[in-house]
Amino acid sequence: MKGNNLFLKMILLATGSILSLAVHGQSISGRIIDETGKSLPFATVVAYSLPDTAMVEGMMSDTTGCFQIKSPGELLKVSFVGYETRWINYPKGYLGDLVMEKGEAMLKRGEHHSAKTHHHQPPRPHCSQC
């Protein structure tokens, strides 16, 4: 009786683990650039779960601005010093280029702010993570 009970618990544990991997197995990736198309290396990328906004995974983009998060949450935060923070709800798969806008402090120094598209998907960049 105890052997059957242990076997059943092991099966349930394995099934739960497989289902968890299936739900959370999809990674998200992209490239962080400025308004001119220049890559922003070492930008902070953090995935959060909802509704409690607990951090799931965080990282910095590589030297080409590329990132890949293997444990995506329901909310993604992208930040870089001198730029406005971006929040993306329910990110999935390859996000393409994420265009960061200059922050208010940077704009006050005489730099121009243009109304460009803020999220477009050109062909994938040639970096190892994207």
Image (tube, rainbow, N blue to C red):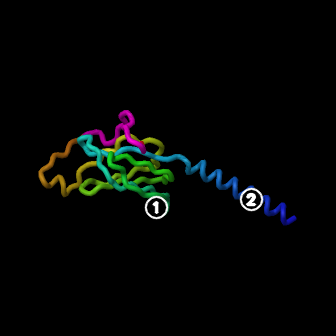
Residues rendered magenta in the picture: 116-129
> Which amino acid type is marked by label 2?
Met
Q: Residues within 10 Å of mark 2 (few under 14, many from 20)?
A: few
Q: Is 22 drawn above or below residue 46 in the view shown? A: above
Give the structural element (helix, strand or loop) at label 1: strand
- Which secondary structure class fits the magenta region best? loop
Q: Is residue 62 magenta?
A: no
Image side of residue 128 versus residue 35, left or right: right
Q: Which mark is residue 105?
A: none
> Which amino acid type is marked by label 1?
Met
Image side of residue 104 versus residue 46, left or right: left
Image side of residue 15 versus residue 116, left or right: right
Q: How many marks?
A: 2
Give the structural element (helix, strand or loop) at label 2: helix
Residue indicated by mark 1: 55
Q: Position of residue 114 (x, y in %)?
A: 20, 42
Q: Is 57 drawn above or below residue 35 in the view shown? A: below
Identity of the residue furthest to the bottom in this view: 2
Q: Residues within 10 Å of mark 1 (few under 14, many from 20)?
A: some
Mark 2 vs mark 1, CA separation in Å: 29 Å
Residue indicated by mark 2: 10
Q: Nearer the viewer, residue 103 or 81?
A: 81
Q: Nearer the viewer, residue 48 or 60?
A: 60
Q: Position of residue 73 (x, y in %)?
A: 49, 54
Q: Residue at x 39, y 44 (%)?
A: 30
Q: Position of residue 105 (x, y in %)?
A: 19, 57
Q: Residue at x 43, y 50 (%)?
A: 89
Q: Earlier in the sequence, mark 2 or mark 1?
A: 2
